[in-house]
Amino acid sequence: MRELMNDRFEAHLDRHISLATLVRDTLGPAVTLMADRVIATLAAGHKIMLCGNGGSAADAQHIAAELTGRYGVPNRRALAALALSTDSSALTAISNDLGFDQVFARQLEALSQRDDLLIAISTSGRSPNLIAAVERARHLGLYTIGLLGGDGGALRTRVDLPILVPSSETPHIQELHITLGHILCSLVDEAFHPDRRDSDR
């Protein structure tokens, strides 16, 4: 049993390292573009909105918390970010009255403003409520980014910037999504570091 556990431990990390290496070698330009758009949106006084289902909802909340709170710079100012999966009353009311497909789109209609930015997180890119959210966001004038996996599903062609983790294994896609989220937060921290002059931003 102990040998089996050790084998699974090593196999999981081997797959993670292999995928992380592939992401490192292929996604740098896209992640840089994502960071540039997020930084520009925040610098212009707009907000970042995030959504996802299940583990991706947790990632959306995690990234939003790093932006509104802090990631690595202790005295960096608060930044406007909102995860659309956190209000249980809104989630249940919208799902009950309008259908689960509208659970994020309806909140975007109520809370977003033109030139805000939406990050939709999905391992498959096929969730109907995320597709509806992206379509509503683009109609409302938001820039849209998809943190996706595999072939990106329907979201790949609907978002302005698709970022695909090249794997079909949901756990490993999620591991790399939060890694990319942390890299994003680090780049945002650098841009809004209090020691930087305003003219540098």
Image (spheres, helix red, strand yellow):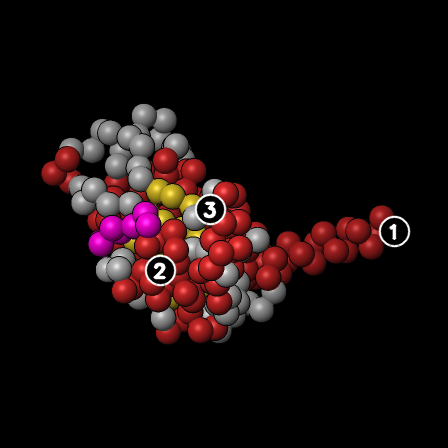
Amino acid under disc 3: Ala
SS assignment at label 3: helix
Choose the circle earlier in sequence order: 1 or 2: 1
Residue 32 in view:
no
As drawn, 170 above or below 57: below
In magenta stretch: residue 144: no
Amino acid under disc 1: Met
Could you tell me how far apart the alpha carbons at marks 3 and 2 are, in whole angstroms?
Answer: 23 Å
Could you tell me how far apart the alpha carbons at marks 3 and 1 are, in whole angstroms?
Answer: 46 Å
As drawn, 138 above or below 35: below
Mark 3 or 2, closer to the camera: 3
State the residue at coordinates (44%, 73%): 154
Please name the predominant secondary structure of the magenta segment in the image. Answer: loop
Rendering coords of residue 26 (x, y %)? 41, 65
SS assignment at label 1: loop
In this picture, which residue range is highlighted in magenta? 110-116
Total marks drawn? Answer: 3
Amino acid under disc 2: Ile
Q: Which residue is mark 1?
A: 1
